[in-house]
Every structure is written in C-alpha cells, then in structure tokens.
Image (cartoon, rainbow, N blue to C red):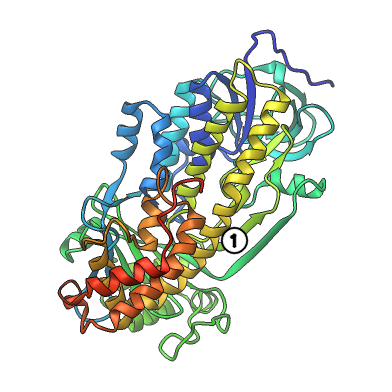
C-alpha cells in the first residue's frame, strides 16, 4: 500500500503526536491560526475515561498562563474557572500550621487545577478549533528520509473514541492481525508533545537525530484523596498548598473546585535509597508498605501523619489508599537536541520532563507553546510556511528554550529538598519571612524571591535561567540579613533596609529583561 497526502486545499498541515496538556493547547492555537492540525494520541479519549487515581494536581502560575493570551478571552476565562486560587504554603510540622506566602501579597497567586479536567477541556477546545483528533494510535516508527516525516502507528480495528473528521487521504492501512497498521506521510512537520516517555523522541534517538539523558528519582508518589466533608470539618484552608514535611517523605494537598483536596504522598521506592533519611523516617518506602499491606500502611500513617488522618477521612480510608493506589514514577529527561531541521521538534515533557516540586512542568510546557507559536508567526506562518521556515523557527525555539528548561529542571530538584525538609526548619522559615519583608519593603522593585521570579516571570521579567542565577545571589543576601532578625514574626519590623540596599547594590546586576 502507498500512503499519500492530498494538498489541494492549500492549507499547511502540522502533525502533533500527543494529546496531553501541551499537545492539546498547541493544537488549539495552531488550528485557530489557520494550520491544518492532526493530533495522534496513544491512549483513548480521556473525556470518556474516569480519572485513574494517580494524578498530581497542577499548579498553574502566571508564567505558564501567558500562553492563554493566544486564546480568545472567553476560552481563557472558562479555563481559569477550573482552578482554585492558592496564595502560599501551609506547613504542618507540629503545632499550629504555618503559612508561607508565595508572592508579595494576595495579588500574586497560583491556580490549583485538576490535570484530568484541564486535559478534557483543552482537547474539547482543540476539536472546536478544527483540529482532527485520532485516539488509540500507538507510534511504531518515524522515517526522516523525505522532506517531512513518515509516521507508522498501530491502532485497534474498532476505532473507539475517534473525534473530528477523518481524512482518509492521510492513511494507508494494513488490516491484518490484532491491530491495524496506519502509515501517515506527513505534508508538514511533526511536533512531538507525547510526554516524558516520548515515542517520537525515542525514534529520533534511535535514528541518531537526538541524544537523551534521563534519570529517575529514588522516590515515587501516590494520590491520597482528602474528601470534602473531612476537609471542611478539619478546617483545611483552600488558599494554601498544604505540606506535611517529614524528611525523606512528605504529604501534600491542593484544593479542588468541589471542596475536596487532591493529596499526593511522596516516599522512597525502596528503603535505603535515601540521601535524606533521618531517624524518624528511616526505612519508610513504598515497597515496604505495599508488601505489608493495609495494616502496615495504617501504622506508618499514625506514626508520621496523625494530624492529617482526620482530613483524609480516617486511618482506614487513608491506609487503603496508601497501600493500594497505583504508584507513579518521578524523573528528569533532558533531550540535547530538540529540532531535526524543519521536519520535527520536541516540546513540553518530550523535550524536558522535570520533577513536580516547583510546580512548573505544565507551565514550562505552556511557555514552550507561547514561544513556538511566536517563532512560527515570524518564520513559517500558514501563508508562507516552507521547510526552510520551519527549520528556522525550530532552531530558534531550541536555542531560546533549552537553557531555561535545563534551569527549571535543576531548580525543581532543589525544591524537592526544600519541601521535604527545609520547610520544617525554623531557620528556613525565618529566612523566608525576611525574604517576604524585603519584597514588601521600599526595595521591592529591586528584589524578588526566586520563587516569585520563577512563577510570575515571563515577558518583561526574568527567564528561568536568570531566576536561577539571581536566586543564588539573593539567597546569600537573605541569609546575611536574617542574622539581624530575632524571629519570623519580627522580620518586617527588624529588617535593616539600609544594609539590604547596600547589599543589593553591591551584589546584584540590574534586573534582566526577557531574552537578555
């Protein structure tokens, strides 16, 4: 059989592999800009599949939400209605919970959003924008010899969950065997948005077009649900990211629209993996809990998370979740090359999967979308797109985004230590109070915390790479200023503004603008 592509309508086709958050958002934006977009997704339509019970709630920050300016105002407004505003951390370290603000004040906040609900929303918007979505297509291979790639997929004979108008001219099918083979001869470039385990990236790597470095964290995660009734009875504040830091493991909770909280527990996969284990948590691991069953899980939770148990609906419900819910893996993937001429480009987790401890995985991916669309507008808009134009756009995209993706990957790993251990440290809490006092002082225009630069940066502000470099210097300044402050509660009153002004003038360059 011989696949072919009918280009009689003159439109510019772009093929996206992956209908996750980044792929669906990119499909929506490109379809609205006049490209003919086809999305191939390995799994079935998520809109017809219940949530799997292994999902980390997303934190959407101003940096990532800049990409929504590419959408109509009404779409952006409906998307934000899916979220709950979060203004800081609520630390449960013993005694009364402690609130640590993210930004200067309540005007700087994040959104807690269900990954599942957001993905459903974006897929529907991509469909409404005119993109064709084909579910149940598992990538088998990528050929790069021609002007644009040829993709081979395996798909079930019963094409369930297909949406959009199918263009048979794109396909040649082998209907023998348990699955049908679908060969797609692309009439334009391929954008790989198929996540941390990207099949496109693996195919490019096998072809020698992409080198990849990946590393798994020695910890995993499980979802732990906080039911609405229990959360409300326990007075869980909806505006905070709740954290129970316990050294080599921790529990977190983020609010949902219905009043419940999606919790996540992070713990070593195997005992002895830890570099952070202390006497209180040594030996704790998912392997041990799962092997010993619900009774062991209950004993573990009572020993380390007694204050969280009423909020989780009681020890029995919580122990069953810990013992039986599926375990997720955590890791970092760094692709050294993102673009293959004008034929293919990696975006989102396919290019730079990171651990979730800075809440920037989705935000970094959405920032990818914003930058890639800007560069396509410049080099390969639908009316003038060409292989050379796509190549220029993809090369510029890689050059602009890779240093920043590497920076946020490093900072996310650093934040893992901060959230597990440092948030419970009184000296760390003092320094965070000094940091906030400095931001709210007359020097606030000169100083922003690393967290604020990462989450609220973007156009006209610092990039991830700049935030990383500035953050190191600024934390040294905070440590020095904290020597003159007696307690977190007195930070604003005791901050030596004159000393702070001198240190900032001596050690910091002028605040960088985006792209500098």
Residue 323 location, x and y as percent?
45, 70
Q: Determine which quarter of the picture holds residue 445.
A: bottom left
With 373 as the anchor, is 386 left or right in this view? right
Q: Residue at x 47, y 75 (%)?
A: 293
Q: Residue at x 26, y 72 (%)?
A: 434
Q: Secondary structure at mark 1?
A: strand
Q: Nearer the viewer, residue 505 or 107?
A: 505
Total marks shown come to 1
Does 7 sit above or below residue 102? Answer: above
10 Å crowding of disc 1: few (<14), some (14-19), many (20+): many
Does 35 sit above or below residue 477? Answer: above
Which quarter shows the N terminus? top right
Q: Determine which quarter of the picture holds residue 507.
A: bottom left
Residue 353 location, x and y as percent?
57, 54
Q: Residue at x 27, y 75 (%)?
A: 499
Does 45 sit above or below residue 428? Answer: above
Asked whether the viewer can see residue 481, the reply is yes
Asked whether the viewer can see residue 309, the reply is no
With 290 as the anchor, is 352 left or right in this view? right
With 334 as the anchor, is 286 left or right in this view? left
With 76 as the anchor, is 153 left or right in this view? right
Residue 362 location, x and y as percent?
47, 48
Does 216 sit above or below residue 280? Answer: above
- Return the residue found at the far bottom: 279
Q: Which residue lies under the disc numbered 1?
A: 332
Residue 228 location, x and y as percent?
23, 56
Q: Nearer the viewer, residue 467 or 123?
A: 467
């Amino acid at each position: 059989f011989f696949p072919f592509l009918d280009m009689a309508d003159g439109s510019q086709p772009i093929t996206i592999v992956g209908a996750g958050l980044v792929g669906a958002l990119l499909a929506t934006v490109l379809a609205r800009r006049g490209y003919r977009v086809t999305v191939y997704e390995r799994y079935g339509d998520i809109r017809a599949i219940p949530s799997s019970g292994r999902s980390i709630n997303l934190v959407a920050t101003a940096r990532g939400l800049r990409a929504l300016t590419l959408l109509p105002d009404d779409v952006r407004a409906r998307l934000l209605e899916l979220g709950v505003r979060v203004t800081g951390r609520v630390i449960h370290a013993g005694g009364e919970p402690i609130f640590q603000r993210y930004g200067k004040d309540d005007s700087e906040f994040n959104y807690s959003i269900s990954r599942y609900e957001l993905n459903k929303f974006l897929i529907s918007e991509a469909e409404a924008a005119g993109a064709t979505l084909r579910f149940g297509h598992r990538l088998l291979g990528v050929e790069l010899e021609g002007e644009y790639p040829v993709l081979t997929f395996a798909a079930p004979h019963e094409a369930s969950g297909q949406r959009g108008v199918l263009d048979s001219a794109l396909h040649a099918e082998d209907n023998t065997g348990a699955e049908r083979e679908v060969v797609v001869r692309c009439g334009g470039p391929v954008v790989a948005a198929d996540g941390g385990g990207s099949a496109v990236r693996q195919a490019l790597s096998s072809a020698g077009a992409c080198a990849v470095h990946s590393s798994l964290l020695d910890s995993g995660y499980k979802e732990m649900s906080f039911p609405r009734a229990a959360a409300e009875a326990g007075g869980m504040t909806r505006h905070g990211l709740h954290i129970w830091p316990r050294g080599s493991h921790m529990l977190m909770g983020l609010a949902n629209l219905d009043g419940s909280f999606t919790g996540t527990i992070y713990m070593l996969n195997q005992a002895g993996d830890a570099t952070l284990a202390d006497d209180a948590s040594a030996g704790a691991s998912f392997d041990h809990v799962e092997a010993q069953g619900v009774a062991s899980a209950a004993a573990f939770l009572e020993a380390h998370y007694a204050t969280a148990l009423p909020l989780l609906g009681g020890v029995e419900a919580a122990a069953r979740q810990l013992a039986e819910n599926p375990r997720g893996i955590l890791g970092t993937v760094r692709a050294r090359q993102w673009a293959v001429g004008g034929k293919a480009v990696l975006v989102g987790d396919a290019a730079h999967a990171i651990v979730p401890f800075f809440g920037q995985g989705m935000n970094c991916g959405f920032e990818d979308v914003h930058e890639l669309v800007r560069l396509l507008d410049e080099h390969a808009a639908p009316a003038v797109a060409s292989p050379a134009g796509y190549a220029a756009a993809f090369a510029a995209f890689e050059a602009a985004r890779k240093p920043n993706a590497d920076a946020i990957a490093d900072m996310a790993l650093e934040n893992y230590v901060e959230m597990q251990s440092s948030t419970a440290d009184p000296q760390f809490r003092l320094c965070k109070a000094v940091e906030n006092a400095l931001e709210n002082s007359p020097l606030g225009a000169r100083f922003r915390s690393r967290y604020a630069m990462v989450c609220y940066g973007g156009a006209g502000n610092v990039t991830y790479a700049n935030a990383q470099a500035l953050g190191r210097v600024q934390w040294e300044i905070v440590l020095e200023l904290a020597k003159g402050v007696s307690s977190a509660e007195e930070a604003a009153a005791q901050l030596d503004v004159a000393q702070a002004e001198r240190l900032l003038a001596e050690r910091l360059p002028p605040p960088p603008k985006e792209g500098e």
